[in-house]
Amino acid sequence: MIDSTTGLFGIRFISDYAFFTALILWGIAALLYMYPPAAGFGSSSNKAERVADSMVDRSKSDKVDTLREEENSQMFTKLFIAGVPPMALCLLATYL
């Protein structure tokens, strides 16, 4: 609908919609995979951040970081799998 009025992306075929859908899903999945949750300031080169990090009880924050990393991995897998049908539709519409 938006593209038919604006012509912004130049989408004219169903395979184009499928390709851009897969591209968006896989792009978000790649960001979740490449940038896991940070593990604190312990590896920082700033002395104040290292001192502040040494005063923090890491037991609870490590559990939260582990949980967030597991959730990111699950969401990555879901988004990657969700991008497979649009890409298959794109390839089928293009070559058939």
Image (cartoon, rainbow, N blue to C red):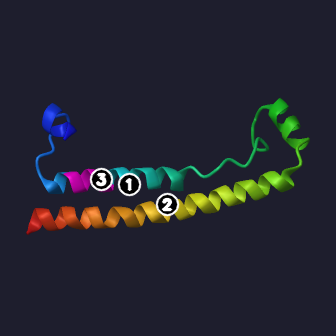
Please tell me which of labels 1 and 2 falls first in the chain. 1
Task: Give me the residue at 83% from left, 54% from top.
Answer: 60
Q: Could you classify mark 2 by the number of other residues whose Cα lies within 10 Å: few (under 14), some (14-19), or many (20 or more)?
A: many
Q: Position of residue 25 (x, y in %)?
A: 38, 54
- What residue would you read off at disc 2? 76
Picture disc at residue 11: none
Residue situated furthest left in the rendering: 96
Q: Real-space Cα distance between discs 1 and 3?
A: 6 Å
- Determine the CA span between mark 2 and mark 3: 15 Å
Q: Amino acid at mark 1?
A: Leu
According to the picture, the residue beneath numbered tag 3 turns out to be 21
Dot 1: within a 10 Å radius of its alpha carbon, few (fewer than 14), some, or many (20 or more) residues?
many
Residue 19 in the magenta stretch? The answer is: yes
Residue at numbered disc 1:
25
The majority secondary structure of the magenta stretch comes to: helix
Give the magenta part as a residue range.
17-22
- Which three-letter amino acid code belongs to the residue tagged 2? Phe
CA neighbours of label 3 inside 10 A, class few (<14), some (14 to 19), many (20+): some
Mark 3 is on which residue type?
Thr
- Confirm whether residue 9 shows in the render: no
Residue under the point 19% across and 34% down: 8
Q: Earlier in the sequence, mark 2 or mark 3?
A: 3
Q: Are marks 1 and 3 in contact (CB under 8 Å)?
A: yes
